[in-house]
Amino acid sequence: METCIQKQQVIFIMGATGTGKSRLSIDIATKYSGEIINSDKMQVYKGLDIVTNKITEPEKRGVPHHLLGEIDPEADFTAQDFRYHALSAIRRVLRSDKVPVIVGGSNSFIEALVDDPLSSFRSKYECCFLWLDVSLPVLYSYVAQRVDQMVDAGLVDEVRGIFDRKADYTRGIRKSIGVPELEEYFQAEMEGNDESAENLLEVAISDIKSNTCKLINTQLSKIYRLKKEVGWPIHRVDATTVFEKRGKEAEDAWEEDVLQPCFKIVGDFLKNSMKVQHLY
Ligand code: ATP
């Protein structure tokens, strides 16, 4: 007797912070009828939307998101928790005949989902890995500007809202870049030490920038390891030109240098990996 087993398809969008993963995920989800499953370990928590740089409602353009801003910010959400919740979201998305698009910079979460022997993920799902990359000097300068924009958008007040000297800064959302860096500043502010508070704020903002650059480096070394040592078939797409241009030229670069190659990779994947294995 002949049995047909069809692997279901899952798309992953990887890359360092600031490279445009969220925007790409919306473009891909819109074109291929997808839903997003967040794999950023700080964006899973409720709150700190500016600090963690969560996608906004208008930016979502109606695309449903899972595991975004859902978890209690005091809880410790582990890679195992992610695997459990992401698997259940993938099943739900597939049941509604949509394509799951997993997006976020936490490579330990993605690895726990894909390579954990308990879930035998690869035997059930066909994976397409996209890596959105931007040249380092260009990305460093972009994320530094982005921190200044976050400060203008209210980052300091947002973090002040959860400041608690007695809180555990080693778990939950308080581990986000932007939170520990501001602690000394809030302390000086509380003690009414205005002069030192002003200096401490400047130091904190500069630390947030340098810690974001360090995060980029560790994220990239994890992606290199998955691609080169572990052997994941990760497609690298270079978005540098988008960041070097402005206005209409930047939009054109997004279309030509990012969307066209990504749509080709994803389009071929969705067509070709409709493999039917015949078992006798
Ligand atoms: P690690 O095992 O080092 O935590 P990871 O792959 O599991 O790495 P990353 O996404 O690289 O997870 O996050 C590492 C750290 O970077 C987090 O613990 C947090 O401090 C910070 N971080 C990650 N994402 C964000 C974010 N969206 N906003 C602020 N800080 C973040």
Image (tube, rainbow, N blue to C red):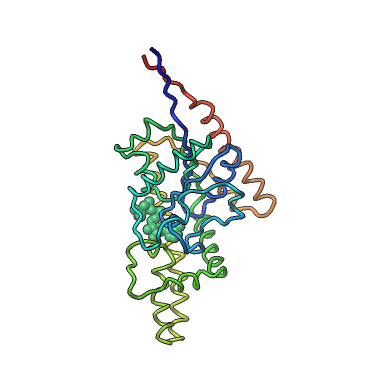
Relative image position of residue 119 (x, y in whole percent): 33, 37
In the shown orientation, is residue 222 left or right of residue 61? left
Quadrant observed for ligand 1 in the rendered image: bottom left
- Specify the quadrant of the image occupied by residue 233: top left
Give the vertical position of 94 relative to 190 (above or below): above
- Specify the quadrant of the image occupied by residue 74: bottom left
- 130 or 84, which lies in front? 84
Which residue occupies the extreme left position in the image?
118
Residue displayed at 46% across by 76% down: 201
Looking at the image, can residue 148 be seen? Answer: yes
Q: Quadrant of the N terminus?
A: top left
In the shown orientation, is residue 280 left or right of residue 252? left
Q: Quadrant of the C terminus?
A: top left
Residue displayed at 51% across by 55% down: 18
Which residue occupies the extreme top position in the image?
1
Relative image position of residue 125 (x, y in whole percent): 42, 33
Relative image position of residue 78 (x, y in whole percent): 33, 52
